[in-house]
Image (cartoon, helix red, strand yellow):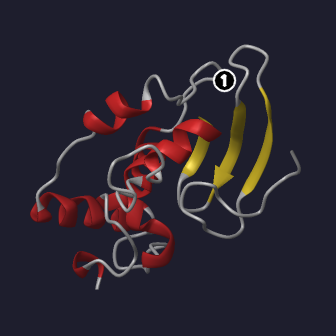
Amino acid sequence: MPESRTCPICGGPNADFAGGRSDRHRELIWDGTCPRCGKVRATDEAIARVNGAGHSIPSQDRSYLLSAFFRHFGTGSADQLVTTSNVEALLRDLPAYTPMEKRDLLLQYAAATSIKVGAESDYRADRDYPIVFARDHESRLLR
């Protein structure tokens, strides 16, 4: 599979992915980085399942949750891989933040990406909405 500049999870630009077949799993693996999702290592089938394929409600797109998972937790090692056998458990076990907790996450991120107190943050709603587990950059919390 050729390299991709578009993230298979969020559809964002400027991603750096190389796809290939894993001998161990015999599935297409997306392995790379995305400015929005962070470090990603997942099978094509797991991503398709999260994007709504295989669900009774086709519009049940949960890709924002997978994006939030990778942004927060990433793949710690080369052996860690999101597959169809573990993706549901990973999404189910994600924290369920209240709106106030999401606002705190946003403030913590803004502080962490500032070089000093009072300086501008590197936060960008179009890129960083997975930080607060939002569906997209137009979430009311981010405006």
- What is the secondary structure assignment of the residue under circle 1? loop
Q: Is residue 82 above or below residue 39?
A: above
What type is the residue that disc 1 sits on?
A: Ala
Viewer-side residue, 88 vs 125: 88
Residue 111 falls in which quadrant of the image?
A: bottom left
Is residue 1 toward the left or the right of residue 75 in the image?
right
What residue is at 22 percent from the left and 76 percent from the top? 141
What residue is at 60 percent from the left and 61 percent from the top? 35
Is residue 69 toward the left or the right of residue 80 in the image?
left
Q: Quadrant of the C terminus?
A: bottom left
Give residue 95's position: percent from left, percent from top: 22, 42
Residue 7 falls in which quadrant of the image?
A: bottom right
What residue is at 43 percent from the left and 25 percent from the top? 86
Circle 1 residue: 78
Give residue 13's position: percent from left, percent from top: 68, 70
Which residue extends farthest right?
Answer: 2
Q: Is residue 107 above or below residue 90?
A: below
Residue 116 falls in which quadrant of the image?
A: bottom left
Is residue 13 toward the left or the right of residue 5 in the image?
left
The 10 Å Cα crowd at callout 1, few under 14, some 14 to 19, many 20 or more, is few
Q: Quadrant of the N terminus?
A: top right
